[in-house]
Image (spheres, rainbow, N blue to C red):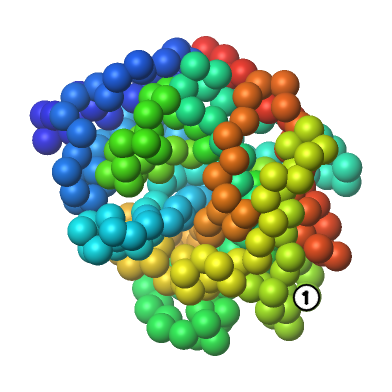
Amino acid sequence: MADAQAIATAFVEARRAARALLSYPGLAPGDLGSAYRIQDAAIELDGRSIKGWKVGRINPPLDGQLGANRLAGPIFAETVVSLNNSEVPVMPVFADGFAAAEAELLLHIAPGMADKRPVTDAETRLVIDEVRLGMEIASSPYPGINEDGPTVTASDFGNNHGLVMGAPLDDWQETDLCAISVRTLIDGVLIGEATAATMLDGPFGAVRFLLANLAARGIDISGGTWVSTGAITGVHQVVPGQAVQAQFGTHGSVQCTIGTAKVV
């Protein structure tokens, strides 16, 4: 725990100071349990309110080695922007660290549903009370966060640094979420196109994973929480000054400009 606390402190302080960590601040966790101990310590040190959780994929062969095909990280309330009309917010990233934008579907677990353990998509729909279009801003002071693997990614808040929440998907109960065509553009150039059908067992599977993950960690979401369910078109690296747009077929789009993180 002493190592976990030291690593957590290093990440929290670097994020507050908006400065890079050119090397991992300690012995990198060798398993997800160790990674989440660091993350949990950092959440306590950080102290901010959590509005939701990001879910990211763990690819083969590491999924088999680590015993999980997804990972989770907190999304702090003050880093979430809810769009109004055609607003284009500036989303800060750690310019000397790692930064990416990801088109995602956002599902809200309803209050009182944290103890549910759905096993099918139909059952999972019953714990959801809202779906929105969204974009995760993935950023860390440590530039090697993704290259070093899922345990390192999980240890620093899952590599999250913000969330853009777009319009509600009003007809989500009747919509096949995995059939929505999603496109990501950076500075007007198409860089990724896919559907959520490529994401393991889809957005509802991400919700099932998160419910189990947080329950195992003793984290209370009885009041409800948002789930950023995973990158649909890929993890697209960005730099300050770029404009990013995520298009969700006929359902709408979400956009932002990338800025530079400031000292907080």
Q: Is residue 171 above or below residue 45?
A: below
Q: Nearer the viewer, residue 64 or 101?
A: 64
- For this view, does 133 lie left or right of residue 86? left
Q: Image point 24% across, 38% down: which residue? A: 38
Q: Residue 162 lies in what quarter of the image?
A: top right
Quadrant into which the N terminus falls: top left
Q: Image point 65% across, 47% down: which residue? A: 135
Q: Which residue is mark 1?
A: 171
Regarding mark 1 in the picture, which secondary structure is present there? loop
Q: Position of residue 15 (x, y in %)?
A: 43, 22
Q: Image point 73% across, 78% down: which residue? A: 175
- For this view, does 78 lie left or right of residue 6? right
Q: Is residue 228 above or below residue 88?
A: below
Q: Position of residue 54 (x, y in %)?
A: 48, 51
**Looking at the image, which residue sits at the far left?**
2
Q: Image point 59% across, 40% down: which residue? A: 236
Q: Is residue 204 above or below residue 168?
A: below
Q: Position of residue 47 (x, y in %)?
A: 39, 32
On the question of residue 264 being in view, the answer is no
Total tally of numbered discs in the picture:
1
- For this view, does 133 lie left or right of residue 93? right
Say what amino acid the circle numbered 1 marks.
Asp
On the question of residue 252 being in view, the answer is yes
Q: Residues within 10 Å of mark 1 (few under 14, many from 20)?
A: few
